[in-house]
Amino acid sequence: MRMGRSERESRTAGRVAALAASAALLLTGCIRQELPQAEETREDILVVGFSEVGAESDWRVANTESMRHTFTEEKGYELLFDDAKQKQGNQIKAIRNYILQEVDYIVFAPVVEDGWDEVLKEAKEAKVPVIVVDRMVQVEDESLFAAWVGSDFHQEGKVAVEWLERYLEEKGRSEEADVSILHVQGTIGSSAQIGRTEELVAGVAAHPNWRILDQVPGEFTQAKSYEVVAEVLERGEVPDVIYCENDVSALGALQALDEAGISHGVEGDVIVITFDAARAGLTACMDGQINLEVECNPLHGPRVEAIIRQLEAGETPEKYCYVEETYFEPGDLTEELIAAREY
Ligand code: GZL
């Protein structure tokens, strides 16, 4: 049975005091003995409790793998993992469980932004530092978490809208020509959905000839996105653009378009814009099936570890750590480039 964090802290304090006393005695020449070596024992392992959103996309799987590859026993960690299956209640239960287990750190990717104040207050009262990854939390008191690592979802949305403006111009579409956009949204209330949606809505407001044909809940999954896009197509509505808030949703949309006999991508009738730039989506983009992949970097493990090391050293980490991201068009991609990427 592993010692709780508070027991570990008092044992460590006791060991430090013993070492200091021995060192003092040695320095005064009172005793001649080897200082007790601080052996690496199980009690020295840092226990990290991680609550993950789920496994809804290959982006999410890569995010999980990044944490698993970072927090290994060889590097002095024990990673406790919980898959919330995209339910906030499961994440709150997991966080409470980690508090009871007296983990050293809690890390979580919040499925939605709201509803975390109470459980994060419990973590603060239990003196368990919390690091938020990927999506953001909206809380009254920002001291409830030590740091956040993730993407700028508004910037991602801006990149997509500005790309569409340029693309339509390059294709000679007149400013007056109607541009209908089918908007396949991610999990409603998640930071990724909020940022990517708000920028599209702002783009439509800035272009009188752009309009949202329909907004449908793709829930960041391929299956749900296929279902909702197929329903729109069955009504005989064919958009000029499909804007999918992650690329497994785009793969679901492509499936529905293919079954309806509607062409898409570089040579097709429907322009496809999406986010994540995970391997399967990038391959479809390289093949010209998707016009734009806006990258969303899931590799948060090393950044979270750096924050934990700072906290262990008594330092104060940056509150917000944005990951670097770019975007890809078909001509940017090769099989070698895609194979060389970590996700
Ligand atoms: C974005 C992340 C989103 C991805 C989806 O940081 O929250 O959640 O875009 C995933 O693939 O479901």
Image (spheres, rainbow, N blue to C red):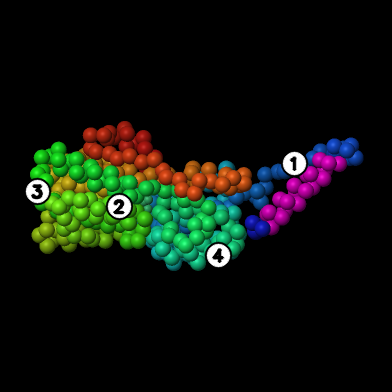
Label 3, residues with CA under 10 Å away: few <14, some 14-19, many ≥20: few
- Label 2 belongs to which residue? 196
Task: Give how far apart the Cα atoms at labels 2 and 3 are.
Answer: 25 Å
First in sequence, mark 4 or 3: give its number. 4
Q: Which mark is residue 122?
A: 4
First in sequence, mark 1 or 3: give its number. 1
Q: Are marks 1 and 3 in contact (CB under 8 Å)?
A: no
Residue closer to the observer: 171 or 37: 171
Residue closer to the observer: 7 or 255: 7
Who's the residue at 14% across and 38% down the image? 170
- Label 1 belongs to which residue? 37
204 sits left or right of 56 in the view: left
Chain part drawn in magenta: 7-25
Task: Give how far apart the Cα atoms at labels 4 and 3 are.
Answer: 55 Å
Task: Give how far apart the Cα atoms at labels 1 and 3 are.
Answer: 77 Å
Secondary structure of residue under mark 1: loop
Q: Which mark is residue 176?
A: 3
Instruction: Give, as a three-letter code, the residue at label 2.
Output: Arg
First in sequence, mark 4 or 1: give its number. 1
In which quadrant of the rendered view does residue 110 lie?
Answer: bottom left
Instruction: Give, as a three-letter code, the residue at label 3.
Output: Glu
